[in-house]
Amino acid sequence: AVQDICTVGLNYFRIIMTYLSPVLPATAKATEAFLNTSLTIDSLSTPLVDHGIEKYKPLMTRVELAQIEKLMQATAEENAKSVANNSLSDANTQYDPIKDEIEIGDFEKVDLRIATIVDAKPVEGADKLIELTLDIGIETRTVFAGIKAAYNPTDLVGRQTVMVANLKPRKMRFGVSSGMVLAAGPGGSDLFILSPDAGASSGMRAK
């Protein structure tokens, strides 16, 4: 009776491993050696009866919880490393490289001033420009800024920003632009004008 039960169990095991052989080839090969037969679909029609098998050897080893946790930790560390490398790679492709070093005297030549936008309007005939009227404390300046894709002119009125006050005026067909507003971003709709912290007032120098 025991042999009959074992024979039925081994035949069911043979059937299961035959279907699993494409995804568990190594285990299937070890099973063929253990059962002393080939695992093929055609052979399943003939059960193993009065058939000698080899001495049993473990076909798989038990996976302990500690092994799973170790594997999960290693995978998490590898994923974190991959994300960091991808982020660094994205940053390298997204941002412009740092320009050549300058002396402190070179920086001090640039006069950065806090400016309040007292008026802003689209420039007729220009797709990208907004005409800004800036209060820089000691005087009012007109600056043409290419931020039309990023901002509605009416939303800019009353905001503070930072401008280059000593930039040589540029004559344009729309008028003279006397300075430049500082903004971050690659361009188009991805532009963000710089704003000072609360407490800064028009005319203060940024340094």
Image (cartoon, helix red, strand yellow):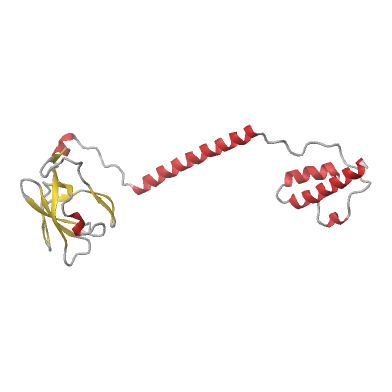
Identify which residue, 165 or 151, lies in the foreground.
151
Quarter that holds the C terminus: top left
Q: Residue at x 51, y 41 (%)?
A: 79
What count of labels does the image hold? 0
Q: Is residue 2 above or below residue 47?
A: above
* Left or right side of 34 for 136: left
Where residue 15 sits: x, y (%)?
81, 51
Q: Is residue 181 left or right of residue 31?
A: left
Residue located farthest toward the bottom when viewing the structure as drawn: 125
State the image coordinates of residue 119 (x, y, percent, origin top left): 13, 56
Which residue is found at the position 12% from the left and 48% from the top?
167
Task: Give the percent coordinates (x, y) of residue 52.
Answer: 91, 43
Q: Residue at x 44, y 44 (%)?
A: 86
177 on left or right of 147: left
Quadrant of image for the N terminus: top right
The answer to whether residue 157 is above or below residue 103 is below
- Give the farthest residue toward the left: 138
Nearer to me, 171 or 24: 24
Give coordinates of residue 173: x percent, y percent: 12, 63
